[in-house]
Amino acid sequence: MNLKRYIPFVVTLLLALSVIGYSMLALPVSSGSSNVTLRIVYPDSLDESDVSDEFAYQILASEGIHVVPTFYDSPSLGFQSLVSGQQDIAYDESGGSFGLGGNSPDTTCVGGYMLGGTFLAIAGDGITNPSQLAGKTGEDSGPGSITRFLNEYWLRQSNVSFNTVSQGGDSIFLKPGRENYDLVHDLETGAAQEIVVDDFILSDFQSPTVNTTANGGPFHVLFYSPNNNSDTCYVVRDDWLSNPTNQQILIKFLAALYQSERVFISDPSAFVTFAGKFLPLSPPTEIAYSSVEYPLHFTYWPYGLYNLQGDQNLSGKFQNTINFYIDAGALSGPVQNSSTKPYGIINKYFELKALQLLGPYDYPNESWVTPSFVSQIHSWVPSWMGN
């Protein structure tokens, strides 16, 4: 399906029909009836980073696949609920699928749409260089979380020492924070001088009346999540994956995720309308900011993670991910993809089938689709997937 050709039709449907009505047209009709429940766990509360999944759920409902999401406060707890059999699919930010935390689980990463990651580090007090963090306090989601891995990775890359005991001396004190808005409050009140948050939070600091010394600023972005490693993924247990019926459900699940990205990338206003219904406490300006920021920074990405080319090819990206975890101090040494049997730590087959089910996708003619952006798409995306 070339979605670009049907953009006017899609937009009309989104405006004129309910989401359920549209989602019945979003994927090919199943050749057989089904009525199954799919349990999915997330490591935190619903926000702009994953609200597009809610659209995918409604696509899946038209296929007879009914999703029950669960949200945990801890990435490691979310992953453990998968391993224990309480969930069918987990959105993993803990690195548990790579054996972090001393685990060697029989799980497999099967896909994802966040090519560029969703996190950034913001500093207050006019700090513009990581070296200025010595003796200061940084906050993230704590040990075992991707935000802590990122923080430690960035600081090591910048030759900034850190500790998890107390503030003072020549190192930055890293302590666990809570939700995004709690971290923002700590940054603005001086309880922390650096925080790692979802990148949609950046919109909250852009007003000239907010980005002031009186509010704990000026604020600056110190780091963005790299896009050369896979720090998150959708992961399943190998015993669940070995069931042929579950394999077909998984393919439809991944296809619905990528179709959701395609719809919202092609029509950002549809994302704003849809997300506003699910995120009533999020400022409208924050949602509008995400509608462009996420496609621009490859957070919303319509081609999956594991069937790309160039410097996004699977083997290279897998090695980059291992190097990232080693550099962050989360892994003691290298591991091989084949070290987890029978599907590996990462397996691209099911994502490939989902992308083939959808057909190619062409980016819309938006102002942020610059020549540089187009060049990156051409270098990463095989021609059969679109451009």
Image (spheres, helix red, strand yellow):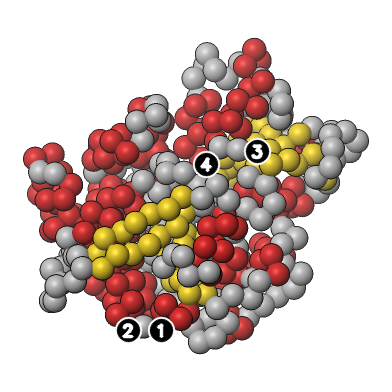
**Residue type, numbered disc 1:** Ser
Q: In front of the other: label 2 or label 4?
A: 2
Report, in whole angstroms, how far the alpha carbon at label 3 lies from the one at label 4. 13 Å
At x 66% / y 15%, what residue is drawn?
A: 213
Residue carrying label 2: 244
Q: Earlier in the sequence, mark 1 or mark 3?
A: 3
Q: Position of residue 278 (x, y in %)?
A: 32, 38
What element does badge 2 sit on? helix
Picture quadrant of residue 362: bottom left
Estimate how packed mark 3 is, as few (under 14), some (14 to 19) or many (20 or more) residues with alpha carbons within 10 Å: some
Report, in whole angstroms, how far the alpha carbon at label 1 lies from the one at label 3. 38 Å
**Residue type, numbered disc 4:** Asp
Report, in whole angstroms, how far the alpha carbon at label 4 lies from the one at label 1. 34 Å
Residue carrying label 3: 177
What element does badge 1 sit on? loop
**Residue type, numbered disc 2:** Pro
Q: Which mark, residue 242?
A: 1
What element does badge 4 sit on? strand
Q: Position of residue 46 (x, y in %)?
A: 42, 44
What element does badge 3 sit on? loop
The answer to whether residue 63 is above or below residue 348 is above
In the displayed structure, does residue 312 sit left or right of residue 152? Answer: left
Residue 305 visible in the snapshot: no
Q: Quadrant of the C terminus?
A: bottom left
Q: Which mark, residue 198?
A: 4
Q: In front of the other: label 4 or label 1?
A: 1
Tags 2 and 1 in contact by the CB under 8 Å rule?
Answer: no
Q: Earlier in the sequence, mark 3 or mark 4?
A: 3
At x 34% / y 78%, what residue is drawn?
A: 247
**Residue type, numbered disc 3:** Gly
Q: Position of residue 310 (x, y in %)?
A: 48, 70
Tags 3 and 2 in contact by the CB under 8 Å rule?
Answer: no
